[in-house]
Amino acid sequence: MSQAMGVYSETRIYPETSLKTLPTAIKGYKIPFNSNTFSSSQNTTAPATITGRRDAVQPILGNVDTTGDLTIPLDLTATGYLLAAAFGNPTSAAAGDSTGLYTHTFKAGETQPSFTVEKAFSNGLYSIIKGTKVNQLETSFGGDGELTLRAGLLGCDETIGKDPVTTTGITEVSFNRLNNFQSSILIDGVESAVVTELSLTIAFGLDDSGYAIGSKGYRTRINEGLISPTGKLTAFFDDESFIDRAINATSTAIQIKLANADGKQSLVIDLPEVQFARKTPSIDGTKGITQELDFNAFYKASGQGTCIQFTLTNDTPSYDF
């Protein structure tokens, strides 16, 4: 058996009907990815048992913690599968024009789906983690680097062996990359020309303490928590508009738009209600001064009925997760 090579590895996800349970007709998606650190670890504890010898006694095994990150390129196709894994099935409809495209709307819901993650190594071994949920999504905009979407995952149990989840019914997902130069940011509906960077983290607040006696150290449940989008906005310090919003606790709408070359396919991220934290810009040298403001998104009265919404327009008819 030869050494496994990252370049030949694959990541596949399989929607579950319930936590750790795959359907009879398994659906699998091989997705493009930058890195996959999702794995299990188990702590050991040195006991205080005295045996009359100076030799250490056998350690005590603790619970198995299955966590890690799956990072994919931010794009117009594969991103939808990760959003469906995080938020559940979107509301999908034909775009209503002659383009033949579809619009998919993802937003916070009462429940969150689970899925199985499979790492297929080039040496013929497979890591299979069942009962997985997305605990965090993270992305950032600005500069000229690669746009990515990082999903922090929380899972139940992992098996490693020579048998894959399935050899049939796997769809290879293509990707249509998005770039920083294709993005724009709107503040209260007006396109901004002063924002230089924006980072966004969506915490799903999952309960990671679902261990039960008799479960062999594995989680048996992962319950939902509050969805809390937070982030940081960096902008040229041209005037007092952002500072005034922070001082007065003014609710502000932020919208991030990304589109392909012809503008027909797009990804739009809406934060309908955002509150900035107060922070006065510092003077660090002779160059132009920028301002950095942390923000929290929330839901109170927005028309979207959610604290965050993703709208994906592309040629994929459905993201049925």
Image: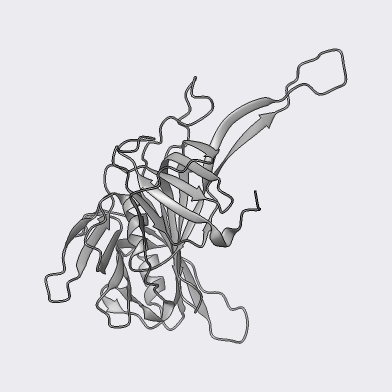
In the image: residue 162, left or right of residue 138: right
Q: Quadrant of residue 137?
A: bottom left
Q: How many marks?
A: 0
Q: Residue at x 43, y 29 (%)?
A: 220
In the image: residue 151, left or right of residue 86: right
Q: Is residue 155 above or below residue 293?
A: above
Q: Residue at x 26, y 47 (%)?
A: 109
Q: Residue at x 28, y 49 (%)?
A: 321
Residue 245 appears at what percent x and percent y? 36, 69
Question: Which one is in front, 295 or 306?
Answer: 306
Residue 40 appears at what percent x and percent y? 56, 40
Residue 148 appears at what percent x and percent y? 46, 66
Residue 34 visible in the shown view: yes
Residue 294 visible in the shown view: no
Residue 282 appears at what percent x and percent y? 56, 74
Question: Which one is in front, 182 or 304?
Answer: 182
Coloring basis for residues: one colour
